[in-house]
Amino acid sequence: MAAKPCIRSDTAQTLTFHVPTGEGAPSSPTVVLYDQDGTQWTTTAPTATASGQNLTVTVPAGLVDDEAINYRARWTYTASSTTYVRDQAFDVRKQVFYATLDPTLLTTKYARLVTARYPSGVTSWQNEIDLAFEMIQDAIRAAGKDPHLVIDPRQFERAHAEWTAYLIARQYAMGDQTTDDRIRWAEYMHEAGRRSLEQALAHVDWYDEDQDQGADSEEEGLNANRTMITR
């Protein structure tokens, strides 16, 4: 499942909505922002822009003092002579969980996980990195925790790399002469990522339970629920 967008409350942030490709290229976008009670934030709608299949809007800083869950952007745009109205849920938080893994780290720090199994002709693994990051966030939520209260995202980097390697091996197994090897490697990497994730979840200092943006002494005994992570 795709992760719901989340933006910080203390700085201006860009909110992006991806228009389904089948609708055609969007134009003339507008957007209205609503809080969780359905009240419009401001009387003047912020400016929306279109680029390719993406619509974007800059959300000003300070619209929300604390966390705000399930706010809504209502996008209106034209594509292929048809007008569409789409709602997008998003959260506003003091801090936002982010990926520390990127293609450079994957092919250097974690090269042993993937280099021997590179399909030819692929120049970037960003798509697999993004999908694996969504898996990490879903797994943290399955453990009963909020990813955006994670103090140090680097604790999840190894699990992120291993699940990226799992997705790469699974994605390129079909029709390859080394299919059996890729499938076995995918299974091994999925299990390795699950173990790394559970180790990260078990750390006593990783979670900001009281949302004060720090791991204080009262939180040192708060471990994540070690929910078994499955496919």
Image (tube, grey):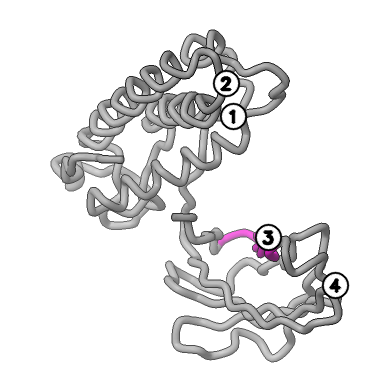
Q: Which residue is drawn at 54% across and 14% down?
A: 177
Viewer-nearest of discs 4 and 3 = 4
Q: Which residue is drawn at 44% across and 55% down?
A: 1
Q: Position of residue 118 (x, y in %)?
A: 59, 16
- Whether residue 68 can be seen here: yes
The three-letter amino acid code for the residue at tag 2 is Leu
Q: Position of residue 136 (x, y in %)?
A: 39, 41
Question: Which quarter of the image is occupied by the C terminus?
Answer: top left
The mark total stands at 4
Q: Pick whichever of labels 4 and 2 is earlier in the sequence.
A: 4
Q: Where is residue 200 in the image (x, y as percent from the top left)?
A: 28, 32
* Up/down of 198 relative to 83, above or below: above
Q: Name the residue under label 3.
A: 14
Image position of 110 (left or right of 85): left
Q: Name the residue under label 2.
A: 105
Magenta span: 10-20
Contact? badges 4 and 2 (CB < 8 Å): no
Disc 4 crowd rating (10 Å Cα; few below 14, some 14-19, many 20+) is: many
- Nearest the camera: 147 or 217? 147
Cα distance between the residues tagged 2 and 1: 5 Å
The three-letter amino acid code for the residue at tag 4 is Ser
Q: Name the residue under label 1.
A: 102
Q: Pick whichever of labels 1 and 3 is earlier in the sequence.
A: 3
